[in-house]
């Protein structure tokens, strides 16, 4: 059935096959047959040219997840990340608006000419020519049907309806599922399709994301006995993903609202010291059972650096020197406790920050002092911790004392870095 669906998507009983496959992946037990059904749905989403099969699948998935009261495997929701909406829908809308504008201009011109009493230029056709023209149009329509030419307007309509169902599902999960593992995948989906969300929903959506972060923080502090390793990393991952989603919303059309995301910046800054142990734990394989990877965020490291890049290296604008200095100092403190691979990434990231703001070079010297006072490492606000009173002593310690050659080389490159 999976092969029939992927190879012959236009099959008459496609809806029945989709219903059978979706019913199979709705079970709590996940086996090889469930994986094959899910892969078949992913292939349908990737190869869909008209938008109709995707709409049918999303409608059935939406109904099934709600009937199961959101008690499904997170992999079920993760397949929606493969929908062809991220770029195609935007292009279709743009071309449609252009066509409508052109068509309306032509109609307006004809109307003005008619109002002035002028005859609209139209070629005079005999009955024989009109009959031939009608036959030619009919042949053209049949040729397009035979070649399966996709109507851009119809596809845009189907994809718009798919997008509505998708966001209804995501928003219902965010508002209703307090501790569901579906939260992570729903946040990934919102971050992926953020540029297609109506700007009127941004403020409410950010408030919901703040609430999710607060709940995850309380859960992390209150549950340390059951499974502290996996549960702690899962909650931390969810909190970092909330930060990524918030900044993805701001990128693009969200900039017009001038939203303040300092809460998310301070939250991630406060979270960094708590990640020292979690980044050292080898629980990626266990986390994939809870948070399936379909967006390049296979582990906590990748997610953390994506969040840091969103805050400290935005596409538009530039964070203050205080924020850059505070994050760089706290990251270097974290690098002392992380595995070599993560430590090398942190040193490279701090070096990029150094190239972004030359004022950070003062933190490499013990002689030059930019700010008076004492660095407050216990203050969880990057604007108030007086970061320029600190020194990057961790760089020298890693260069001289770390057991890994790559870490020592990365620390040496950072210490000797000079602007080109």
Image (spheres, rainbow, N blue to C red):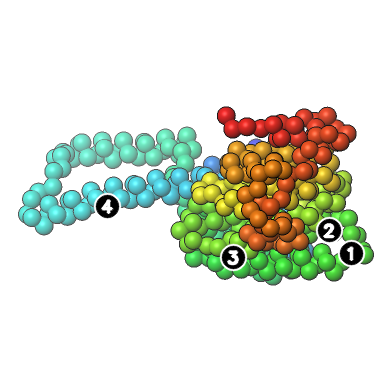
In the displayed structure, 246 sits above or below 302; it is below
Residue identified by numbered label 2: 232
Say which of 191 and 162 sits in front. Answer: 191
Q: State the separation of the CA atoms marked 2 and 4.
A: 58 Å
Q: Give coordinates of residue 51: x percent, y percent.
A: 54, 48
Q: Quadrant of the C terminus?
A: top right
Classify residue 249 as left or right of residue 232: left
Secondary structure beneath dot 3 equals helix
Residue identified by numbered label 1: 224
Mark closest to the chain's N terminus, 4 or 1: 4
Say which of 383 and 315 sits in front. Answer: 383
In the displayed structure, 45 sits above or below 73; it is above
Of tags 4 and 1, the one toward the viewer is 1
Mark closest to the chain's N terminus, 1 or 3: 3
Q: Are marks 2 and 1 in contact (CB under 8 Å)?
A: yes
Mark closest to the chain's N terminus, 2 or 3: 3
Q: State the separation of the CA atoms marked 1 and 3.
A: 30 Å
């Amino acid at each position: 059935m999976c092969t029939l669906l992927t190879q012959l998507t236009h099959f008459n009983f496609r809806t029945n096959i989709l219903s059978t496959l979706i019913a199979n992946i709705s079970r709590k037990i996940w086996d090889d047959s469930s994986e094959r059904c899910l892969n078949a749905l992913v292939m349908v989403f990737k190869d869909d040219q008209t938008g109709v099969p995707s709409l049918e699948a999303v409608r059935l998935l939406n109904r099934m997840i709600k009937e199961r009261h959101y008690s499904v495997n997170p992999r079920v929701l993760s397949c929606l990340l493969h929908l062809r909406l991220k770029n195609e829908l935007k292009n279709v809308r743009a071309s449609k608006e252009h066509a409508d504008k052109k068509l309306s201009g032509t109609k307006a011109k004809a109307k003005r000419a008619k109002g002035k009493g002028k005859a609209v230029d139209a070629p005079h056709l005999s009955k024989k020519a009109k009959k031939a023209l009608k036959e030619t149009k009919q042949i053209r329509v049949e040729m397009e049907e035979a070649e399966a030419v996709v109507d851009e307007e119809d596809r845009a309509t189907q994809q718009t309806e798919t997008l509505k169902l998708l966001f209804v599902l995501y928003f219902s999960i965010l508002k209703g599922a307090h501790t569901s593992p579906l939260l992570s995948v729903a946040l990934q989906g919102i971050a992926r399709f953020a540029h297609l969300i109506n700007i009127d929903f941004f403020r409410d959506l950010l408030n919901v994301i703040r609430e999710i972060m607060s709940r995850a923080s309380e859960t992390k502090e209150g549950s340390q006995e059951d499974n502290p390793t996996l549960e702690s990393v899962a909650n931390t991952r969810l909190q970092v993903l909330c930060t990524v989603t918030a900044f993805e919303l701001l990128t693009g059309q969200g900039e017009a609202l001038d939203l303040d995301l300092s809460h998310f910046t301070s939250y991630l800054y406060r979270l960094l010291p708590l990640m020292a142990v979690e980044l050292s734990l080898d629980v990626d394989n266990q986390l994939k059972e809870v948070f399936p990877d379909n967006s390049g965020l296979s582990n906590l490291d990748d997610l953390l650096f994506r969040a840091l890049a969103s805050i400290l290296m935005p596409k538009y604008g530039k964070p203050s020197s205080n924020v850059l200095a505070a994050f760089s100092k706290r990251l270097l403190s974290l690098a002392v406790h992380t595995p070599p691979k993560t430590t090398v990434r942190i040193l490279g990231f701090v070096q990029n920050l150094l190239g972004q703001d030359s004022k950070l070079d003062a933190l490499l010297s013990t002689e030059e002092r930019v700010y008076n006072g004492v660095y407050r490492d216990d203050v969880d606000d990057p604007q108030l911790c007086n970061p320029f009173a600190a020194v990057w002593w961790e760089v020298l310690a890693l260069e001289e004392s770390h057991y890994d050659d790559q870490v020592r080389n990365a620390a040496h490159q950072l210490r000797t870095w000079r602007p080109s």
